[in-house]
Each structure stands twice: as structure tokens, then as C-alpha cells.
Image (cartoon, rainbow, N blue to C red):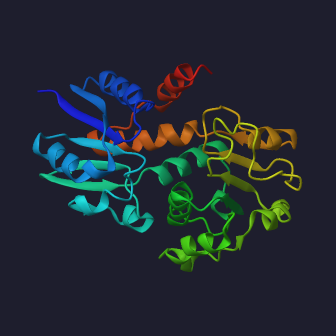
Amino acid sequence: MEKVYGVIGNPISHSLSPLIHNHCFANENIVAAYHAFLVKKENLSLAVRGMKAIGIHGFNVTIPHKEAIIPYLDKVDPLAKEIGAVNTVVLRNDSYIGYNTDGIGFVRGLKEAIQKEKVEQKKVLIIGAGGAARAIYYSLLAEGFTNVDLANRSVERARQLISGSTYASRNFSNTYSLAEAEENLEQYDILIQTTSVGMSPRTEESPLTLEKVKKYTYVFDIIYNPFETKFLTLAKEKGCHIYNGIDMFVYQGAYAFQLWTGIWPDTEVMKKLVINRLGG
């Protein structure tokens, strides 16, 4: 019997998750199908109960449900609980268990991009303090990174993000306004841009000018459409190594697939599928 998986969100028609997961199921000869489900905020509780009732084996969660879904799950993985958001749900023994693969997906891509010894000791600046920044910050600390600072338009929000972490004892984090961050960029080995600035229709905008970034800094932007944001273009002009958000998207999906099936999928093929669909 065919197993059913999916992704819930609103909006959802733009999601590339069905593309990559249905390919992975076919590639691994797994009889399963992955669908996108439009779920409005007011219907979230009904949707989760209905999915369990009909035996949906697992699903991804995207905007605006990543935080709101937690009370409707039977269990939540410790890291997802720490982050305060779930993007992957697994059915085990008639229970829905929530995980967050966004942050660990990003960290996997970062480590593959840099491939240097003691990368965890590199000095990191995360730009933004929203849900993506929170997932990446907590996942970096969970992976042993010890020098991670945050810059945000609201410094207080950045402070709140840090103060909520039980991993904070492993890392003394500084918080900066965006203007303050501009003046301190030369001290960082890795920059991670997690805001929506640079995404269509704001493609000519960047959260920072990068005037003081040092050459050969590793610069990441979690946006992947457009492929190269203004932020990455500025970094490239300064001689930095640049990376968009495709790796994060692919690896968070790969971790979800592994949670559902026990199989690590072919991530290189997944990347090619996404790039081709986006016209890259």
C-alpha cells in the first residue's frame, strides 16, 4: 500500500518539496507519494488530527505553522523544543513526533562548504533574529560552535533569542545593531544572512553594505531565489566565498527523508532538481 507524506503551509503552491521528495521515493524504490497541502491557521488542529486519522506517515511544516503546530503533536525532539519550532513530523507507534531539520540542514551545508579543521572555532555572525536565525543559532551551538554573535535591527530581539538557549553556557554571544555590525565585520570568518532582505521583490536591497568585510570570509545567504542576492554580490566583490540557500533547503529535506525512511538520499541529485526548476 502506498504511504503518503506531505507538506503543510499557507501559501504552499510554490513549494519545491514535492519535487525533491517524490524523486527520492522513486529513486529508492519506495512506494510512497508526497503532496502539498494548503492549511489555514484556523484549521491547523483539525488538519493534524485528520492526517493522523488517515495515516499520513510524515510531513513537513512551513510558514505559518512551524511554532503553532507544537501543541498538537504527541512529542517534540529536544532540539526542536529548544528552537521552539518544528518543520518535520514523523509518525511512530501512532504518535506524531516533531523535529527541526532547518538548523542542522544549514550546518551540514556550511561544513561541506568550508571543509576545514576546527571550523567550530571560527567566529560567526548571524544577521537576523527570526525563526531561521533561531534554528541556525541553536543548531550551531548544539554542533559545538563556540563563537557565534547576532546582529539585528532590534538588538533586544537578538538578546531574547540568546537568553532562551540552554546552550548559551557554551557560547558567549554578543548582540549588535546592524550599524554596529557594519563596524565589526573584519573580525568574522563566517557571515550568515537569515532575513528576507534581498528576496523578490526586494532584490536590490542588502541588510549590510559589507564595506569592512575581510577577503576570503565565508558568506552565506539562506535565500535561494534569486540565486545571488545583492548581499552575496557585494560579498563576491570583496573577494569572499559566497553560498546561497539551496544547500540548506536540500539538506533539511534530506534529514526529513532520513527520519521518515532511515535512508539518506542523493543530495547532489536533489540540488540539481532544485537548480533546474529555478532555471539556474
Q: How many marks?
A: 0
Q: Residue furthest bottom?
A: 169
Give the residue at x 61% y 41%.
223
**Vertically, is 136 above or below 43?**
below
For the C terminus, give its image quadrant: top right
Give the residue at x 35% y 66%.
78
Which image quadrant is residue 156 in? bottom right
Foreground of the two, 74 or 263: 74
For the N terminus, give its image quadrant: top left
**Residue 249 in picture, x, y percent from top left:** 50, 39
Give the residue at x 61% y 75%.
159
Name the side, left or right, on which 212 lies relative to 150.
Answer: right
Give the residue at x 56% y 38%.
247
**Residue 49 in picture, x, y percent from top left:** 16, 50
**Vertically, is 88 above or below 274?**
below
Foreground of the two, 231 or 144: 231
Foreground of the two, 254 or 174: 174
Name the side, left or right, on which 58 lies relative to 211.
Answer: left
**Residue 268 in picture, x, y percent from top left:** 51, 28
**Vertically, is 234 above or below 175?**
above
**Vertically, is 68 above or below 223?**
below
Q: Could you tell me if residue 122 is visible in this image?
A: no
Q: Could you tell me if residue 92 is visible in this image?
A: yes
**Residue 184 in picture, x, y percent from top left:** 83, 65
